[in-house]
Amino acid sequence: MHSIAQKRTFTTQPPHKRTFKKMKSFSIPSLFKSNLIGRIKEARRVQDKLKKDFTPTHLDFGPVEVLLSRHFGFCYGVENAVETAYQIIDQNPDKRIFLLSEMIHNPAVNADLLDRGVRFIQDTHGNQIVDWSELSSNDVVIVPAFGTTLETQAILQSRGIDPYAYDTTCPFVEKVWNRADAIGKKDYTVIVHGKPSHEETKATFSHSQSVTPTLIIKDIKQAIALAAYIKEEKTPEEFFVEFDGQYSAGFNPAKDLKRIGVVNQTTMLATDTQEIVDYLRQIIRLHFQLSPENIKDYFADTRDTLCYATNDNQSATYGLLAEEADFAIVAGGYNSSNTAHLVDLCVEKLPTYFIKNAEKLISGDQVLHFDNVVKEEKLSQAFIPTKEKVRVLLTCGASCPDAVMEEILRKLVSFFPGAKDVDEVVNTNLQSS
């Protein structure tokens, strides 16, 4: 029976003020850009500046029509992290450069960084690749977009490295930390809806538990399980077994579940987080016999802590799914949480193929794609139906480069004999919009 904090041996340090300036405009390396996709995005942005239209872009190539999601690809946090990483590499040619872990959950970006000599200190599961003892004060260590824990910051400081010097933590992740900090200082326990093994959730937990008792729950099933402890129907001893590895040191379920607030890993499904919030609020209200006026005394109003890109991409996916189609293709890193959730949405309605790049489209008969349930790639045959007109939904996660999307689009269209030229169709579409 261990809490997360009990399993760690690092000494936490109080947070320091950032010295790295967040950027408002970005210059992404050309290998990740796509003029074709960029023009489509810009046209939709001009048409819909308030981002209220979630209908897809229709690209009709004759025998195949591709419905391109209204929102997809690099978000603010990813663009900031990617641009910053490449600037750091350019500005420090004579220094060793390390990343705490993957910059973002995209294989193309991480592979290119490795090719440029950047080394990862840990993998995405927290396994050590480079021993901390190998680092010195002369090394550059980049904090990825997911952020990092206070324990890791303390280790870097012990090696003479400023953990904030090259910190690319997404500002929307920091927003969650600030929300957790604010409600924690008002004596609420923080419940984090997220994946316990995800880098972002680990970072959020670390920052939150330095202020207040904190617990991670994976899903609505664990929220329902938690209700039994809120209502004191089960013992603390059972809690420590059921939530092993997900609670902060010294967590006291008899005391710490009376006043709670829910924040989340920013890439979780918005509907899932809202379901958990609504459920736990109702449990608290009924158990303590609260009126609507005094519910806030026991349940903090955290509102939505999902980032704008997660909201936009999920809303745009619902817009895609409102259309009839034969199958969907979702692109992104297989360990990308936000991408996996888009896949989950699509799978509920139609055959969906989760691929990380165009190479996975082997031919018009074969596709090698990731199965979200068994967590491995599998080969599917005859994935394109034999019919006069095929309709395909196409989207990707927030860490997938536009260049990958263009490659997938072009390769997909190439499987259809007699299909119209991709550039001509896009140009016509943009001229008529």
Image (cartoon, grey):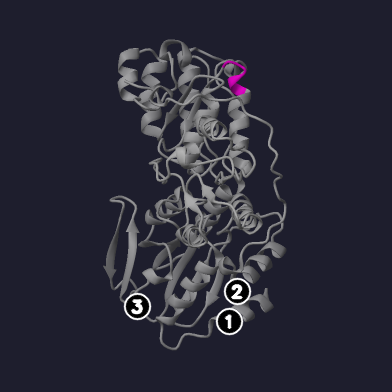
**Magenta stretch: residue 251 in it?**
no
> Which range of residues does the magenta coloring cover?
183-187
Residue 278 can be seen, yes or no: no
**Residue 158: where, in percent of width, then height?**
54, 31
Instruction: Give whichever of 57, 308 is nearer the camera.
Output: 308
* Label 1–label 2 contact, CB within 8 A: yes
Q: Is residue 394 above or below residue 282?
A: below
Q: Which mark is residue 423?
A: 1
Q: Is 200 drawn above or below residue 426 in the view shown?
A: above
Q: Is residue 232 left or right of residue 278?
A: left
Which secondary structure, mark 3? loop
| Quadrant of the image containing the C terminus | bottom right
Query: What type of secondary structure mainly makes up the magenta span?
Result: loop
Q: As shown in the figure, which amino acid type bears the numbered disc 1? A: Asp
Badge 3 density bin: few <14, some 14–19, many ≥20, Cα 10 Å = some
39 on left or right of 126: right
- Residue type marked 3: Gly
**Which residue is drawn at the image coordinates 54% and 81% (left, top)?**
422
Residue behind mark 2: 36
Q: Secondary structure at mark 1?
A: helix
- Tell me how far mark 1 sits from mark 2, CA to CA: 8 Å
| Between discs 3 and 2, the one toward the N terminus | 2
The residue that appears at 54% across and 14% down in the rendered structure is 290
Residue 3 tag number: none
What residue sits right under mark 3 in the picture?
Answer: 364
The quarter of the picture where residue 207 lies is top right
How packed mark 1 is, by other alpha carbons closer than 10 Å (few <14, some 14-19, many 20 or more), is few
Asked whether disc 1 touches disc 3, contact meaning CB atoms under 8 Å apart, the reply is no
